[in-house]
Amino acid sequence: MPADLSYSEFAIVWCAVASAYVIFSIAGFGTALVASPILAQFVPVAHIVPLLALLDFFAAATNLARDGRHAEVAELKRLVPLMMAGSAVGAAVLLYTRPDILMLMLGIFVIAYALYSLSGLKPDTRFSAGAAIPFGLVGGMFSALFGSGGFLYSIYLTGRIDDKNRVRITQSTLIGMSTLTRLVFFVAAGVYANTGLLLLAAMLATAMLCGVFVGRRITLKLTREQFIRVVNVVVLVSGVFLLLRYFS
């Protein structure tokens, strides 16, 4: 047990992380959205991002090892270079400007899109391959700026891929690749030299694995329409979360 957590506090943190990875296993993103508000009550804020980055990477690796053959390689080839370029742009924006207004604009766009998708007012539409350019670039940029760009990849992939399992594993693979960049940075910065952080990550690995298992079982039982609705709800909450961060 990490020295700063009682057994009851650790139980709360464990349940929060398990719940977060149920969402991650279904939608391919959303761990920070679910887990961060609760973790912040018990874990130093500076530890939350590297902790979740470590767990996200291994959750994505678990999904990839089990279902990697279902990933859409063509979409990965489109999105990964754009994601990396967007991350570089995001890092530059972070260094030279205040990105707060971008958070506000993205939050408004995401909420509007999710509400429109959930309304049932539009027929099913399919994005063209060219849509990877804005979604990949902006997703990478916001991953670098705010650690949250996965919902943009999800919007694109659900508009391109019919099979929900292919959407899930392709999304998870993208998040794993994005997280790997952050892991390299954290390792270089010596963040993981903190043995308490590593101990907590090791103890929460069981929560991550349980969440991934339960989320996968749920996903297999969903129809494509139910899956897209769940993803759009998570996207909507992500947008609300961005607005709360902007106005707080």
Image (tube, rainbow, N blue to C red):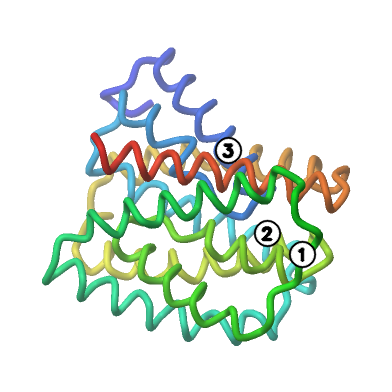
Residue at which label 2 appears? 63
Helix, strand or loop at disc 2? helix
Residue 55 in the image: state x and y as whole percent: 48, 50
For mark 1, what is the residue?
A: 67
- Is residue 214 depicted above or below 152 in this figure? above
Label 2, label 1: how far apart the Cα atoms are: 6 Å
In this picture, residue 186 sits left or right of residue 234: left
Residue at 41%, 80% (x, y): give it: 84
First in sequence: mark 1 vs mark 3: 1
Answer yes or no: do the residues labelled 2 and 1 have beta carbons within 8 Å? yes
Find residue 244 and report its horizontal and vertical position in percent. 34, 36
Q: Is residue 25 visible?
A: no
Task: Measure how far apart labels 2 and 3 are at the Cα level.
Answer: 15 Å
Q: Nearer the viewer, residue 218 or 200?
A: 218
Name the residue: 23% across, 69% down: 188
Mark 1 surroundings: few (<14), some (14-19) or many (≥20) residues within 10 A: some
Q: Secondary structure at mark 1?
A: helix
Q: Residue at x 38, y 63 (%)?
A: 143
The kind of secondary structure element at disc 3 is helix
- Which residue ends up furthest to the left in the rendered image? 96
Q: Amino acid at mark 3?
A: Thr
Marks 1 and 3 sit apart, C-alpha to C-alpha, by 20 Å
Amino acid type for the residue under numbered disc 1: Asp
Residues at marks 1 and 3 touching, judged by CB atoms closer than 8 Å: no
Pointer 3 residue: 206
Residue type at mark 2: give it. Answer: Asn
